[in-house]
Amino acid sequence: MENNQTIITPIAITAYSALSASGLGCEALYQDLQAHHSALAPLSLFNVPFPAYVGEIKQPLLRIRESLADYNCRNARVALTALNDAQGAVRAAVEVAKASYGAHRIGVIIGTSTSGLYETEAAYGVLLETGKMPADFHFVNEHAYQATGRFVQCELGLTGVCFAISTACSSAAKAIAAGQRLINSGLCDAVLVGGVDTLCRLTLRGFRSLELVANQACTPMDKNRQGISIGEAAALMLLEKCHAGNADKMKVLSVGESSDAHHMSTPHPEGEGAALAMRNALQLAGLQAADIDYLNLHATATKINDRMESRAVFSVFADSVPCSGTKGVTGHTLGAAGALETIIALLALKHQFIPGTQGLQELDDECQCQVIKSPLSKQQLRIAMSNSFGFGGNNASVIVAL
């Protein structure tokens, strides 16, 4: 990217909500972060033949209304429950936006890596037993990547742009980037963005086959870390063009992206793609490294990824920015992580605190960046960054501000 790259126009975040293992709503998430409490626990949703600590949602999920029954799956129910969090008021904000702009001017972009795969696994179980797929299984409306986004659009009565992004663990961060571009290009006046991913057998067994799943709660950036703890979540944000009516809202300044394509599942060992995403985000926002007050690390708790990210962060910031990894609280929520952890960055700005790195006991000897072990309160934070790095080198760094 050239140094004279045009600075992108910030957009307002008029509402946001999260549902994760910490519970429903951003307040529940904030309480776990502030208390340095891990929501990880042994898997109970289904059985796997190995120990697995996960960030499983225990919150009762809302039912899909009859007219949208073809979309009925765990992913859609998780999205619906998050959408109806009264505290986050996302649904109410969408209604206000519809009245202001029209349903056709509001887009929906949802990042996901699993979509309705949990239901597909159950359907194939029925097929093996009976020789037939269940009559109520609808592949396109449950399993396909666009299914949850389409469900959200129908549930809210929106008629604008609607699509899904699936770039593994950077999916939801890239949804934020796409939403900002849609607004700045004039194609939309508001975009509901975020990520929704739910637990399923394929991801647990798949990561296990790569020897990346810890047999205990994950310990990001720790010298003795063993691997990831997979989580599930829905994290939703309504983005709108800035105007006098939302001047007091927090902003998305920019999203820096890169695609280093070093390896299908392993990042560049020196973090070149990750560093490029962070630098691109700074350039697009017209900022310097010293302007970032807090950095939420991707920090998956795998040996290679944490080492890579620490090198990438140090190459951009040296040891000047306080940073932490929060997957020890929520688990790695895969396609939802980029939005969930952007919301964590928003909570850090709102409450003027820096989350700790849950599970960290002894910092990796090779880590040179300033990793915060326990939460810090009474901070002075104005701008925060959140990193999300996916398979194939699909990287995204989101910058948000008060």
Image (cartoon, rainbow, N blue to C red):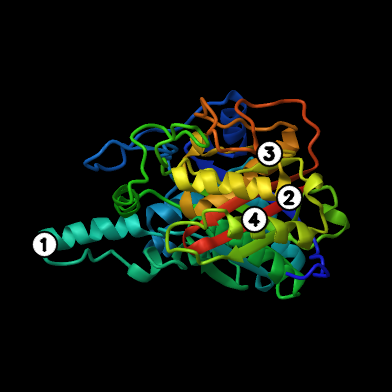
Q: Name the residue under label 2.
A: 400
Q: Which residue is drawn at 40% across and 68% down?
A: 144
Q: Distance between the residues labelled 3 and 4?
A: 24 Å
Q: Is residue 162 above or below residue 290?
A: below
Residue 96 visible in rendering: no
Report the quarter where the N terminus lies.
bottom right
Q: Are marks 3 and 4 in contact (CB under 8 Å)?
A: no
Q: Quadrant of the C terminus?
A: top right
Residue 347's disc is 3
Residue at image position (58%, 38%) is 367
Alpha carbons under labels 2 and 3: distance apart? 11 Å
Residue 349 image position (x, y, % from top left): 74, 39
Q: Which of marks 1 and 2 is in front?
A: 2
Q: Is mark 4 on a helix, strand or loop?
A: helix
Relative to 265, 244 lies left or right: right
Q: Where is residue 225 in the image (x, y as percent from the top left)?
A: 44, 35
For the residue pair 115 and 258, the one nearer the viewer reads as: 258
Q: Mark 1 points at which residue?
A: 130
Nearer to us: label 4 or label 1:
4
Could you say which disc has been placed on residue 275 in the image?
4
Report the Cα–Cα distance between label 2 and label 4: 18 Å
Per the image, label 1 sits on a secondary structure element best described as helix
Mark 1 touches mark 3? (CB < 8 Å): no
- Mark 3 is on which residue type? Leu
Q: Which of marks 2 and 4 is nearer the N terminus?
A: 4
Secondary-structure class at tag 3: helix
In terms of depth relative to the viewer, which is nearer, 245 or 46? 46
Q: Is residue 215 above or below residue 276?
A: above
Near mark 1 (Cα within 10 A), the count class, few <14, some 14-19 or many ≥20, is few
Left or right, 116 with respect to 318, comes to: left
Give the total of numbered labels: 4
